[in-house]
Amino acid sequence: MMLDMGRGRPKEAIEELRVEDNGEFEGFSALHIAASTGSLEVCRHLVEELLIDVDLVDKEGRTPLFFATYRNGGTAEYLLDHGANPDKADNNGFSLLHYAAEIGICEMIELLLAKGAYVDPVSARGTPLRGAAREGHYGAVKILLDHNADYNKMVNGVTPLMAARDANSTECIKLLVKVQEEPMLKREIVASELISLGSISLKKKDYVVAAKLYSQVY
């Protein structure tokens, strides 16, 4: 109310209030600070009582959720439950999932994906899967693959497997190779079944069906 100076617009007054120093916190709003320090009650007051925009950005284009994702799971989940955009990227094009994957915060990766975050956003450093592989975060790689991340996605000539190889991350390399081999094995099984069915059709002199079955294999 003091900041509003009697204008009757406390929401706008609070949203306009920003940290002005030249350090890490430049451009922070009150909600950024509350989210990053885990002050859930303050977050609730700002969001539910004053109706502060949950996707306010600092000078780098980072939302309060970005800092909650790094430092406090409780406030991160709260913000997501109250409309925060899990896919919001910063000024460099990096999403929250990129950062969580590169740092290897498995709980946050799972939370973001559970709240609808896109698993394969692309930035200058590739996808979250590539970032996790580059840093050798096996757990993060596995979670992303379990959510159908594109293991063949190439950005600037580099795939997740190539990133894992460059990082000399044996565990990540094995996991990525395994997931690439599985579709090949499935195709081999399907081909074997088609050949078997084709042979049966030939024995029955059903040449049209046999030809169609064999054509799907070769």
Image (spheres, rainbow, N blue to C red):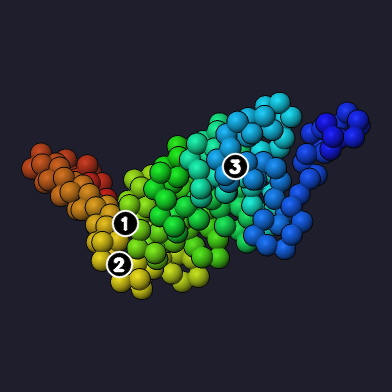
Secondary-structure class at tag 3: helix
Q: Residue at x 64, y 34 (%)?
A: 42
Between 140 and 68, the one nearer to me in the picture: 68
Tag of residue 169: 2
Q: Give x and y (percent) for residue 69.
A: 52, 46
Q: Dot 3, how many residues are within 10 Å of its Cα: few (below 14), some (14-19), or many (20+)?
A: many
Q: Give x and y (percent) for residue 48.
A: 67, 27
Q: Are marks 3 and 1 in contact (CB under 8 Å)?
A: no
Q: Are marks 2 and 1 in contact (CB under 8 Å)?
A: yes
CA gap between label 2 and label 1 equals 9 Å
Relative to 22, 79 lies left or right: left
Query: Can residue 117 be seen?
Result: no
Identity, as a three-letter code, of the amino acid under mark 1: Tyr
The residue indicated by pointer 1 is 138
Q: Residue at x 57, y 44 (%)?
A: 37
Q: Residue at x 34, y 67 (%)?
A: 164
Relative to 139, 181 lies left or right: left
Identity, as a three-letter code, of the amino acid under mark 3: Ala
Quarter containing the N terminus: top right
Q: Nearer the viewer, mark 3 or mark 1?
A: 3
Between 3 and 191, the one nearer to me in the picture: 3
Q: Residue at x 74, y 29 (%)?
A: 50
Label 3 or label 2, whichever comes before in sequence order: 3
Secondary-structure class at tag 2: loop
The residue indicated by pointer 3 is 35
Query: Can residue 172 be seen?
Result: yes
Identity, as a three-letter code, of the amino acid under mark 2: Ser
Relative to 159, 5 lies left or right: right
Tag of residue 120: none
Label 2 or label 1, whichever comes before in sequence order: 1
